[in-house]
Amino acid sequence: MPHFVVITEQGPGWDEKKGASQQKDGDEHHSFMSALETKRVVLLGGPLGDSSRNRALLVMDAASERAVRSTLAKDPWMRSGVLKLAESYPWEIRYGGGNLSW
């Protein structure tokens, strides 16, 4: 299955007065992402160092960009606007993939 690199960032529903762990529906978001990891849909993921936009990077297994968008649209943080999908790119892993247990 093809891989995609996905960048998410804070959306209009992000509460500037709260940190990432205190955002609305945080437990539901975490459960959703953990389930995607268990299903090996999300292979890697986590926040990026740029805290001004609260961005995160995901490496996903998906048949198409449409599948990426459809999957992430079910995330409670995407539905409530806490996060939004900023960028998505097909990605061909050429180096180092053999060291990972995907």
Image (cartoon, rainbow, N blue to C red):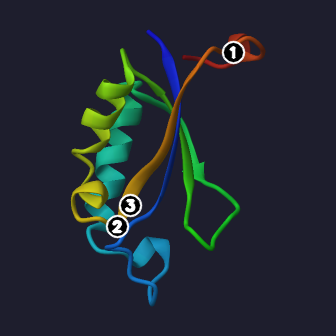
Q: Residue at x 30, y 25 (%)?
A: 67
Q: Residues within 10 Å of mark 2 (few under 14, many from 20)?
A: many
Q: Nearer the viewer, mark 1 or mark 2?
A: 2
Report, in whole angstroms, how far the alpha carbon at label 2 lies from the one at label 3.
4 Å
Q: Residue at x 35, y 72 (%)?
A: 12
Query: Which comes sooner in the sequence, label 1 or label 3?
Result: 3
In the rendered image, which quarter contains the C terminus?
Answer: top right
- In the picture of the structure, the residue carrying the numbered disc 2 is 82
- In the picture of the structure, the residue carrying the numbered disc 1 is 97
Query: Which comes sooner in the sequence, label 1 or label 2?
Result: 2
The residue type indicated by label 3 comes to Leu
Q: Nearer the viewer, mark 1 or mark 3?
A: 3
Number of numbered callouts drawn: 3
Query: Considering depth in this image, is 5 or 25 the residue closer to the camera?
Result: 5
- In the picture of the structure, the residue carrying the numbered disc 3 is 83
In the rendered image, which quarter contains the N terminus?
Answer: top left
